[in-house]
Amino acid sequence: MAETTTHDAHVSSTGLSNVKLGMWLFLGSECLLFGGLISTYMLYRGRVSDGPTPEQIYDIPFTSVSSFVLLMSSLTMVLAVSAAQKKDDRGVNLWLTTTALLGATFVGGQVYEFTAFYNEGLGFSTSLFGSSFYTLTGFHGVHVTVGIIMLLALVAINKRSSVPGSKSETVEMIGLYWHFVDIVWIIIFTLVYLIPV
Amino acid sequence: MTTETIEGTHLETEQEHGMSTRGYIVVALILAAITALEVSTYYVDFGPLFLPSLIVMMVVKFVMVVSFFMHLRFDNKIFSWLFYSGLLLAVGVYVAALSTFHFFLR
Amino acid sequence: MFKTGSKLFLGLSGFAAFNLVAYVIFVERLAIGGVALSLVFAALTGLAAIVLLINEGDNERQPRDAALIGASLWPLTTVVGIVLLILGLIVAQIYFILGIVVVLAALAEWLVQAWSESASDDPAHNESARQRLLHPIEFPVIATLGLGVVIFSFSRIMLAISKSAGAVSFIVAASLVLLIGALFALRPALKPALVSGICVIGAVGIVAGGIAGAGIGLRSDLAEAAEEGHYLHRECGVEKSKYFDKKAMKNLSLRSNAAAIVELRDGKLSAIMVGFNTPQQLITASRANPVTFIFRNFDPTERRLVASLGNAMAGAPAAESDGEEADHAGKNETCTQLIPKGAEQALTIKYNKPTIAQTEPFTLTVPGVAGQSIEVLVP
Amino acid sequence: MKVRRLTSRYLGPRSLAASGSLLLLASCATNAPQDTWQPKGPNAKMIDDLQQPVFAVAGIIGIIVAACVGFAIWRYKDRGQPIPEQTHGKPALEVSLTVIPALILAVVGVFTFRAIFDLARTDDTQLVINVTGQQWWWEYDYPVQNEWGITQPIISSGQLVLPIGTKVLLRETSRDVIHSYWIPALNGKRDAVPGRVHTLRLQADAPGIYAGQCTEFCGLSHANMRMEAVALSDADFAKWVANQQAAYQAPAEGTLAKEGESVFLNQCVRCHQVSGLKRADGSLAIAAPDENVWSGAAPNLTKLMTRNTFAGAMFNLLRDACRDDVWRAESAAFGEKYLGGVDESCLNVNDLRAWLRNAPEVKPMYANPALLTDTNGKYRGMPNLGLSESDIDKLVAYLLTLK
Amino acid sequence: MAIIERPTPVLDIPALPAAPPAITPSRTFGALKRPVASTGWKSWLFTVDHKKIGLMYGATALFFFIVGGLEAVLIRLQLAAPEGKVLNADLYNQMFTMHATTMVFLFVMPMAAGFANYFIPLQIGARDVAFPRINAFGFWCFLGGGIVINLAWFLGGAADGGWFMYAPNSGPVFSPSNGIDFWALGLQIAGIASLTGAINLIVTVLNMRAPGMSLMKMPVFTWLVTVVQFLLLFAIPVITVALFLLTFQRSFGAQFFDVAAGADPLLWQHLFWIFGHPEVYVLILPSFGIVSEVLPVFSRKPLFGYPFVVFSGAAIGFVGWGVWAHHMFASGLGPVSVAVFSVATMAIAVPTGVKIINWTLTMWGGKLVFSTAMKFAVGLILLFTIGGLSGVTHSVAPSDTQQTDTYYIVAHFHYVLFGGSVFGLFAGFYYWWPKMFGKLLNERLGSLNFWFMVIGMNLTFGPMHILGLQGQPRRMYQWTEARAGEGFFNIAFWNLVASIGSLVLTLGILFFLINIVVTARSKVRAPLDPWNARSLEWMTSNPPKEHNFDSIPKVEHLDEFFHRKYEEDPVTHTMRGVATAEQVLAELERNADPHIHMPSPSYWPLVLAVGLPVIALGVIYSTMVAIVGGFIVLYAIYGWALEPATAVASDFDTPSTNGHAVSTTHG
C-alpha cells in the first residue's frame, strides 16, 4: 500500500506497526459483525414455516470437504507470510496464488451449495431459516471473495515491484484477514452445519 | 511523519516471530485431524458428549489458528487484548441476548 | 482544435443521438433501449469533450516517432461490441446491454491508449500514465470476471455430477492445487511460466467442464427436487412421509414467542399458556393474528401435531396465501414433522376466519392419539 | 399526596426553586387522567411506593451537588488569588465518594428486585382478559371463564371492563406492529408485541374509568390510540357480562333503525362483526375483514352502545356533559351510570357522523388507494365509504340499537 | 515552507530521459497528477490533513445541527397547543425520526469526531493521524451518509419509524415510502465513517504519542475519546447487522421480522440497543472529555483525581455493554432479564457520579475564571446531574414502566444529551475556537448565547418531566384537551411553556451563529495562549501549522504545557511563572525538525466515498445503478492500493528537461 520510508527516527510509541494494529482492531470489530449474523441464524434455524429444514438439505460430506479446503488455504497463507518474512518473492507469489485458488474452490463450492439448496426448495424468502442461512453464509462468502481479490491483486502488484519483500507487511495483513475468515468458518461449520436443530 | 509506512521498522525488530514451515504443517495436520473428528460426530453417536465435544473441538481449532497461524502467541500481547476483547464481548453480548429468547432453557 | 480523435467521437455521438431519436420515435418511449442509447450518447459526448479538453494545450505537432504507436486491440473490440449491440436490438436485451458494456469499455481503453501515446516522447512515461488511469479498473474487472467465470463453471460441474462424486472431485481439485503448490515450493528450479501455464490449463479445463456441466444440467436428484418441490408439501398423516418427515427437527432456539406450548404427555394433549396456571384444553386465539404453537412430544412413539384450519368459505385460503401452510389432500390442515420423544417443534398459524364461520371447530390433534384434541376458539 | 408532590418537585431545575405556594398549587391538581403519581390499584401502588423514595433520594443528591457547585462558584471565583497548588486529588476521598452512591444504589436494587418479581406474578390470577393491539385500536376478548359467568367469548374494543378488587391478568399481543398497553393508575406499561404473549397485572380498588394511551410508537395514528379501563363492582360486572352475552335484538320492522340494519349489512359487515346479526335470507352475517383490511380484523360492534368510545377510543360516544356525568360519578353510583350505556339524548352525534362520513379525514389512516400497493389493496384503518347523508341517518339509528 | 515535501530520495533518481520541453504537453499530465496543493478548494476536497478534515466534520455537523434544530422547532410548534395543525401525522412522524437521527448521527457524533480529529493528534503531539487517507474517506462517508438519509425528504418522504426503527413497524407494509431504505443505507454508510474513524484514532493514540507521553499522561479528552472509539469499534458492526437485516427485509424479501413466518420482532430491539446503548456513551463521553479539559484550565488547577476520571470513563465504556435491555423494560423480556439489567443500570450510575464529583472538586479551591467556555462546562455539570439523576429513577425497572416512552424520558435524555453533550461541545467551541481559527469568539455574545441556551433549555425540557409524569406519551403528533387534566400540572400549560422555551433556545443558538459571523469578520487575532491552557495542543501556533509541531515536544508531565510555563515554589507550594507561551513556542521552533514529511492529498478517498451512495441508490431503485456504484468502489480501492502514501516527484511538476523539479515548495 505504501512504500517504505525510514527517514524518520520517530518510531511508533508501542513499537508496533500502525497497519497491524489497525487490522487487529478491525478483526475485533468483525467478531461482533459475525456474532450478530450467527446469533440471528441460531435463533431462527428451527423456524421453518415452509420448505426444507436444515438437516434435510445440508450435505455434510461436501461441507466437510469445503471446510477442509478453507483450512488448507490457511496453511498456504501462513506459508506465504513465512516466505514474505524471508523476502522470498517467488514463494510469496506461489503460496498466495495457491491460497487464492483454494479460496476460489471454496467459493465455487458455495455457489454450488446455494444453487443446490435453491433447487431443493430453499429460497431467500422461503422461511426464516432460509433468510438467515443465506445471509450468514453469504456474508462469509463475500468476505472470502474479497480476500481472493486482494490476494490476486497482491500477486499482481508484487510482480511489478522491483524491491523484494517490499510487500511483506501487506502479505501479513491479508494473511490475518484470511485466517480470520477461516476461523469464522470454523465456527459456522460447527454451529450451523454440525449441530442439528 | 508519513504514516501508513512504518512497516520497515517493524520488520527489523520482529524478524523471527512465527514458526518453521514444518511447525505450520504440523499445526495444519492437527487441525485437519480435529476436523475429521468433528465430521465423525455426524456418523458416530457420541451420546451426551456430542454437544460439548463439538464445542470444545471448535474452540481448540479456533485458538490454534489464532495463536499459530495468526501469530498471536508470538506477537505483542496488545494484539491479543484487542482481538480477544472483541471476541469475548461478542460472545457475552450475544449469549445474553439469545438467553432472553429462552435459547438455552426450555 | 478539432482533430481526428475528437472528430471521431463527435461523429459517433451525433450518430448515437440520431439513433436515440429514431429509437424513441419508432420503438418505444422510456424503455431500457432508450435509456441505454442516451447513456451511449452521453458517454460519447463526454469522451469527445475530454478529447477536446486534453488536446487543448497540445500543439499541432505530431509525435515524431511513429513507432511509438503500437498495435491496438481496441478497434476490433469496438466492432465486436457494436455487432453485439445491433444483435441485441434484434434478438434480446441482454446482448444489447452486453454490447453497450463492451463498446464503452473498448472506447475508453482506446481513448486512453491513444491519448497516452501522444502524451510525451517517453514511451515508459506514457505507459505509466496509461497504467495509472486504467490499472485501477483493469485489475479488478479482469480478476472479478475471470474468477467469476471459473467459480461459476466449477459450480456447474458440481451440480451436474452426483453428490458423492462432487465431494470427491472437490477434494481432488483442492488437493491438486495444494500439491502443485507444494511441488513448486520444493523445486525452486521450476519456471514461473510453468506455474502460469498450469494455472491457465486448469482454468481452461474448469471452464470447459463448466460448459459441459451446463449442457448436462442438474443432476437427477436435484432436478427432481426442483420439479416436484419435495419439501413444499406437508403430509399430516400417522405414517412417516418420505420427504417432509426426513430428519425431523428436534430443537428450537426461539422459544419466547409461543402463544401456547402444546404437550403430549402420558397420552394427554394439553396446552400450557402464559397467564393460565393449569394446562388448558381450550385456546382462544385472536383472529387474523399469527400464533405460534410449540409442540413437545413426551410420548415414546414419534408424533406430530396437526392443526385443522377449518372449512370456512370454500376456496378462500385459510392461511396466508404465500404458501406457508399448503392444504394437502383436500384437507385444510397443517402440521409439524413426526418428532421423537423429548423433541419440540414450532407451528405458526394464522386463523383468518372466526370459529362461528366454521361447521367444525378448529382443533389441534395428534394423529394416532385418539380422543385427545385441543379446541382453538377464534372469536 | 403531600409527600408525593414534595418529591416530584425535585424533578426540574425550575421546580428546585419552587416556593411553598407552588407546592400548595401542586397539591390541588385534580382530574389528571394519566398521572403516574396517583395509583388507584395495588400494582401501581407498589411502583409508587418504590419510586417515591427513589425520587426523594435523587432530589436530595441533586440539591447537594447543586449546592456544592454553587458554593464553589461563589467561593473560588477569581478574585486575584494566586494560582493554587497543583494537587492531583485525594484517593481516600474519591473512594468514599464512590462507595456511598454504590451503597445507596445497592439498597435501591434490593427493593427493585422484589418489586420486579412481585409485579411479574401470574399465579394468583382471578380473571384473564386477552388484549390485542392493532393500528390503531385495542381489541379485548374475554376467554370462557365460567366462574365469571363468561360462557362464550366476549369480544369488545375501546374500553376494558374489569371487576374491582380482582387480580386481572391481561394477555397482550398485537396483530401488526408493536403497541404498548398502559393504564397509569393501575400499572406500568407492557408492550404488545406481535407473535408474543405478554402479561400485565391490573387491579382497580374502586369503580371508575381509568384512562391510558398506547405508548409504543405504532405509526400514523399512534397519538389517537387510546384506551380506557372501566372498573365495576362485582355485581355490576356480572350484569355487564350478562348483557354482553345476551342475544342480538333486531330492530323492529319499518323503523329507521331497520333500514340502518340493511345499510350495515351492505356496507359495514364487510369488516365489522355484530354477533347474531342475520342477513335477509336468515344466514348469519359473518364479517370478512381479512379480505379488506391488512390486519385482518376490525372492531367487533356487538353491543357498541354499551361502550363510551369509538374509533380506538379517539372519540367519545357520549356528549361531553354525559361523559362528565359518568367520569365524575361517585363510586357507588358509577356502575349504574356506566351500564346505562349510550342513548339517543347522550349520543355524540357530530363525531359519529363525521366518522361515518369520512373516517380517514378525522383520524389519519392508510386508506389512500394509491398507497396500498404493498398491502395488495387492503386498507389499514377504515376507508371513506362514500355513504350518503340518509344512509348515515339510518346507520346512526341502527347503531343506537346495539346495546 | 516545505510542508508537503517531495520525498528526498526521489529527487536523486533521474526519472526521465531528456526530451525537448516543447514536445511534452503539460496539460496532459495535469489530468493524471496527484493533487498536491495545500490551498484552494482542491486542497479541501482531496485533503488528508486531520485539521482540515476535523474542520469539515465540524462545519458539516453544524449544518446538520441547524437542520435538526429546525425540525425540533417544528415539532414544538406542532405540540404547543392541543390538536396542533402545523404538521400532519405523516410529516410529524418523519420529523421526529429525522430530528433524532440528525442530532445523534449527523450532529453530535460527527461534531465529536471533528474535535477528536482536530485535537487528538495535537494533544498527543503527533503530526497527523495514523491513516490520513482513511481519515478523509471517513469524512466523505459521513457526508455521503448524511446526504443519503436526508435525500429521502425530496424522494417521497423521509424515514418515519422513529430513530429506533422498531420492527415490524419499519417493514415495507407499514412504511411504504422509501424513507426507511434511505435511512438504513445512509446510516450504513455513515457507520463506515465511524468504524474507520475508530480504528484510525485508536491506532493514532496507541502508536503516535510524543516521546514521554505515557497513557496516564494523556489529556482526559484524548482518553475519553479513545474509550468512545472502542465503543464505536465494537458497536458499529452490531447496527450494521441490524441494518442489513432491515434492508434485506425491505428490499429483498427476507423474513427476519415477519411474524407470520415465526419471527420474533424483539430481535431487532436487541440488536438495535446492543448498539444503541454504547452509542449513548459515544454521544456523551467526548463532551465529558472537553469539560475535563476546560474545567482545570479555568480553575487553574489540575483535574481532581485524574486516574479516577480515566478509569471511570473506561468503566462506563465497559459496563455500557451490559445495560442495553433497560431500553426494553416494558418490552416483556421477563422478570429475570429485567432484574439483571436493572441492577447493571444502577451500577453504571456510579462511575458517572464519580465524574460529577471530580469536576466539582476540580473547581473546589481553584481560581475560577468564568469565560463562556467555563460557563458551558459548569452548566454541563448541573444539567447533566439532573439528567443523570432522572436516569437513576428509571433504572428502577418498575418505576421505568411508568416512565418509559413518556415525555419524562424525553426530558431525561435531553438533559443528558443537550445539557450534557451539546453543552460540552459548546464549551469546546469557545475553548478551542482561537486554536482552530486564530480568533477568539466574542465573549459578550458568548454570554448571551450561554444564558439564552440555559434558560431556553430548562424551559423546554424541564416541563417535559411534568408532562411525562402526567402521562403524556412520546411521539404523539397531537395531544388532546380531553386528557390534559386540570390544575398546576395540566399538560396544556406545560406543553406551551416547553414550546416557548424551544424558541428561547433557538435564539440562544442564533447568538452563537451570529458570534461565528462576527468573529470571522473581526480582525483581532487571538493571543497565542488566551486561556493559560495546560495541554500540548496549545504548544503550537494559532491555527496550527500544517505539520502541527516544528519539533515534537518531549513530555514529562500531565499538563505538560502548564508545567513548562509554571514551576512550583518549594516553600509556599504556589505556582510561579517561569516562561510565557511565546517563549515555550520559540524554544520548539528553535529545535525544528529539518525534514518533515507529510502524507500527500489524494483523490481516492473521495472517489471511493462517492461510490457508496451510488450503490445505496442502486439498492433502492435499480440494480444497474448499484453495479455502477460497485465499479466506482472497486476502481477507487485499486487506485488507492496502487498509490503511494506520499506523492512521487512527477506529481508536483511537469516532467522537465533535466528530470528535476523546478521548485519543491508547495506550502
Image (cartoon, coloured by chain):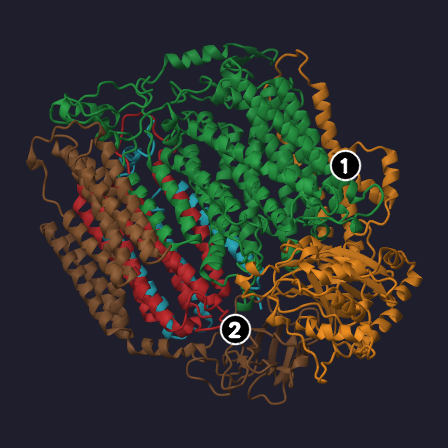
Chain colours: A red, B cyan, C brown, D orange, E green
| Residue C191, x across and y down, in percent | 9, 50
x 34%, y 18%: residue:
E593
Q: Secondary structure at mark 2?
A: loop
Q: Residue at x 34, y 31 (%)?
A: B3
Residue E245 image offset from top left, x and y in percent: 48, 56
- On screen, C268 above or below D256? below
Q: Determine crowd level at label 2: few under 14, some 14-19, many 20+ residues with C-alpha closer than 10 A.
A: few
The residue labelled by disc 1 is D60
Say which of E76 and C93 sits in front: C93
| The N terminus of chain E: image quadrant | top left
- Determine whether, in the image, residue D396 is placed left or right of residue C101: right
In the rendered image, which residue does mark 2 sit on? C321
Q: Classify mark 1: residues with Cα within 10 Å, few (<14), some (14-19) or many (20+).
A: some
Taking depth in this image into account, of C106 and E243 the one nearest to the observer is C106
Q: Is residue B80 above or below residue D263?
A: above
The location of residue C214, given as percent across then percent down, is 24, 69
Residue type (three-letter) at the residue carrying disc 1? Ile
